[in-house]
Image (cartoon, rainbow, N blue to C red):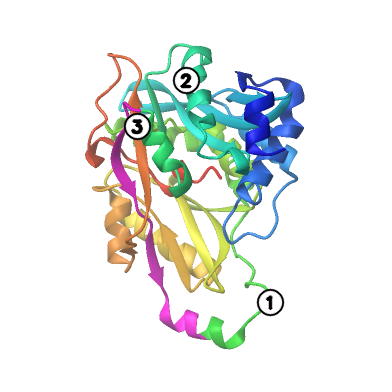
């Protein structure tokens, strides 16, 4: 059906997602985005509907709220809002994060996105204080036109190139990267008590806005995720001093370790540095990638280890939904890692 045909014969209607919409929504996402989910540098993930269930139905923060647009009974647009919980010290903040916005290619730039967002303001349940997201180049313009949103920070990854390993990788041209000498994440994430104690200390020392991490959240995000995450623990005397969570991908034709989380106690730069070195040794990856807030012991350890910021990044776009919402302006209000951003 052409864009003109849809407009002439069937005006758009917008409603909340229903259980039978899963197949058509996944089909729309795959058609509009070229594929879905899009996981850069990774060849295979779960089937799309399994991924949908993990992302939008299994989160410990609750099931996603999805809004769909229809023409002649067919879904032609969708936007998902994931319930999210942020913390700022001892304060919990309920939020929504924008995800998986798509419109049929022939209807892009025709106002479908705006119609969905207008209806979403009426359909989304009350209680959230903030909405936030990291829109890509395609959706950034439409997002900002909706109004009331601020770009509070640009999330720029930091990268390190191990020159000697890069030379070996280029020379060998292996079909597959070397095996990772680290447990799968689910194995390390089974230690609930130790992880909870570590997370409680981290939260007490961080007054900026960040994801409300819990043992349940880490298990969902990294232990049950659709791609393989690995974990390395730093222990002493039975105590968990730190935990690194990372995944492997291919970048520039070489293996790259993407460090999603580096969980250490406030000020513990030494443990952060050990974990970074451990990831390099466990993966033998010529490329490593991370992103930690500044100031933080993780950021200082990464700088010492030779990581450098890339010029490009994703804008962190935030809107305050209530008068009681915390202030959002400025990067010093946020403490996000790659794991907070990469939800695919």
- Residue 161: image location, x then y, percent: 41, 73
- Residue 160: image location, x then y, percent: 39, 68
Q: Which segment did they paint magenta?
A: 147-167
Going from the N terminus, do you reach mark 3 or mark 1 first?
A: 1
Badge nearest the viewer, 1 or 2 = 2
At a point 61% along the width and 65% down the height, the residue shown is 180
Asked whether, in this view, residue 106 is left or right of residue 92, the answer is right
Question: What distance separates the C-alpha of mark 3 from that of mark 1?
Answer: 42 Å
At a point 63% along the width and 73% down the height, the residue shown is 178
The image quarter in which residue 183 lies:
bottom right
- Residue 234: image location, x then y, percent: 45, 53
Q: Is residue 339 above or below residue 3?
A: below
State the mark number for residue 152. Answer: none
For disc 2, the marked residue is 118
Question: What distance separates the C-alpha of mark 3 from that of mark 2?
Answer: 17 Å
Q: Is residue 140 above or below residue 256?
A: above
Element type at marker 1? Answer: loop
For disc 1, the marked residue is 175
- Residue 226: image location, x then y, percent: 66, 46
At a point 50% along the width and 31% down the height, the residue shown is 111
For disc 3, the marked residue is 318
């Amino acid at each position: 059906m052409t864009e003109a045909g849809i407009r002439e014969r069937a005006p758009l209607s917008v409603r909340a997602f229903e259980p039978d919409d899963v197949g058509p929504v996944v089909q729309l996402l795959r058609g509009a985005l070229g594929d879905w989910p899009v996981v850069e540098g990774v060849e295979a993930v779960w089937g799309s509907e399994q991924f949908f269930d993990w992302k939008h139905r299994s989160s410990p923060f609750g099931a996603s709220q999805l809004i769909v647009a229809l023409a002649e009974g067919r879904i032609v647009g969708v936007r998902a809002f994931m319930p999210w919980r942020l913390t700022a010290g001892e304060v919990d903040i309920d939020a929504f994060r924008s995800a998986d916005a798509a419109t049929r290619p022939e209807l892009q730039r025709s106002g479908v996105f705006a119609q969905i967002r207008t209806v979403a303001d009426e359909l989304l349940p009350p209680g959230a204080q903030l909405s936030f997201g990291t829109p890509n180049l395609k959706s950034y313009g439409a997002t900002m036109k909706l109004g009331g949103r601020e770009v509070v920070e640009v999330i720029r990854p930091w990268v390190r190139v191990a020159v000697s390993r890069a030379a070996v990788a280029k020379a060998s041209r292996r079909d597959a990267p070397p095996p990772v000498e680290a447990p799968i994440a689910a194995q390390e994430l089974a230690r609930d008590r130790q992880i909870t104690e570590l997370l409680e200390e981290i939260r007490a020392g961080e007054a900026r806005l960040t994801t409300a991490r819990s043992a349940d959240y880490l298990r969902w995000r990294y232990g049950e995720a659709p791609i393989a995450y690995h974990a390395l623990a730093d222990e002493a005397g039975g105590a968990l001093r730190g935990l690194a969570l990372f995944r492997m991908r291919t970048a520039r034709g070489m293996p790259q370790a993407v460090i999603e989380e580096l969980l250490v106690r406030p000020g513990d730069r030494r443990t952060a540095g050990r974990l970074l070195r451990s990831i390099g040794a466990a993966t033998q990856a010529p490329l490593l990638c991370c992103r930690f807030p500044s100031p933080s012991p993780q950021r200082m350890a990464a700088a010492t280890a030779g990581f450098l910021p890339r010029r490009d990044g994703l804008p962190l776009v935030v809107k305050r939904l209530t008068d009681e919402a915390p202030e959002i302006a400025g990067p010093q209000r946020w403490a996000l890692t790659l794991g907070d951003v990469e939800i695919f």
